[in-house]
Image (tube, grey):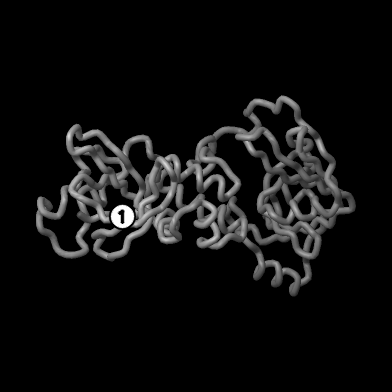
Amino acid sequence: MRAHLGDHLVIESPATGATRRDGEIVGLHHQDGTPPYDVRWSDTQAVTLVFPGPDAHILHPGHGPAAAREQSTAREPSRPPGAAGAGAGAPPPAGASHSGDLGRRVATERARQGLTRAETAHRARMAPEYLAYLEEHQADPSLATLVNLASALNTTVHALRGGGTDMPPGQGIALAHPRLLDLGPEECRTLLSTHGVGRVAVSTPDGPAVVPVNYDVVDDAIVFRTAPDSVPAAAVGSDTAFEVDHMDEAMSQGWSVLAVGPARLVTDPDGIRRLNENAHTAPWAGDEREMWVSIRPTSLTGRRITPADR
């Protein structure tokens, strides 16, 4: 019997063949995937060390029992040590279009919150090795695993799976008893510094426009790169509004911050060099966008929607 992280161990009744217990393999003790295994049982979420008996078999995620079952070592065809078990390397099942992005979403959200793998794994009650596997490989973890991960990262299973990425935000049902709070300047600064995409409002010859830009906060100033002939470049030389927000679709709550201040072109060579060296990301729009614009807020306001009992 050989397994991989993320496989499922199923224990059946010798008499009826019905499943008596099943769990997810979250730890391997041998590189070739032979027992024992650390198994997180689906009924209790407890992780225990398991030496599978003849009533146990392995299921690879996304495969039916007939195709994915591995028999006990007495009936298993001989293969070189370390060789993959049945079903390994097969394509993801139909409907698992987001499984390849799951690991990237988990890793990105974990990094955004400044969490290590060990901290996240502890919060999600899983082995750090299994979390590493999820982040680095195409995987199809159980719903229980996704629920624990979402809770550990303060997000939702829907978000981790990439659901709704093509839909505009705010389509969830409103809270029964919402509470609208005004945010103080310090909280606004903190929230503003956690994001990388915001919206700048400008006046153009064709009328007012609001466009998204990648931005950073440097020395309390909002800075972004653009091209001289682009819409965001029209902000230079005038008072400009800049907005950033975050919405939790599952909980129908969120916050927004609005900064207003003069926009100016950054021309100092040392300042430009510093911005280029410390920028967290390149403009998503691509092309040649090397013109730095700085907005130093003279007004900073924000609001947050939460349940009334918070």
Quadrant of image for the C terminus: top right
Q: Is residue 29 left or right of residue 305?
A: left
Find residue 16 and report its horizontal and vertical position in percent. 19, 32
Q: Secondary structure at mark 1?
A: strand
Q: Residue at x 31, y 46 (%)?
A: 8
Q: Is residue 136 left or right of residue 109?
A: left
Q: Is residue 288 visible?
A: no
Q: Residue at x 21, y 51 (%)?
A: 53
304 or 169, nearer to the observer: 304
Q: Which residue is mark 1?
A: 50
Give the farthest residue toward the right: 298
Image quadrant where one finds the N terminus? bottom left
Q: Is residue 41 above or below residue 131?
A: above
Q: For the residue carrying disc 1, how many other residues have a C-alpha within 10 Å: few (<14), some (14-19), or many (20+)? A: some
Q: Residue furthest bottom?
A: 270
Number of callouts: 1
- The picture quadrant where one finds residue 306 is top right
**In the displayed structure, does residue 170 sit left or right of residue 84?**
right
Amino acid bearing label 1: Val
260 over 33 or under it: above or below: above
From the viewer's side, name the closer residue of 111 and 26. Answer: 26
Residue 280 image offset from top left, x and y in percent: 63, 62
At x 54% / y 38%, what residue is drawn? Answer: 165
Which residue is at a point 76% across and 55% down the rendered structure image?
A: 190
Taking the image as shown, residue 52 lies to the left or right of residue 192, namely: left
Q: Nearer the viewer, residue 294 or 188?
A: 188
Name the spot of residue 38 as percent of width and height, x first: 35, 56
Q: Nearer the viewer, residue 215 or 300?
A: 300
Residue 110 position within the rendered picture, expressed as x and y whole percent measured from the top left:
56, 56
Q: Is residue 233 visible?
A: yes
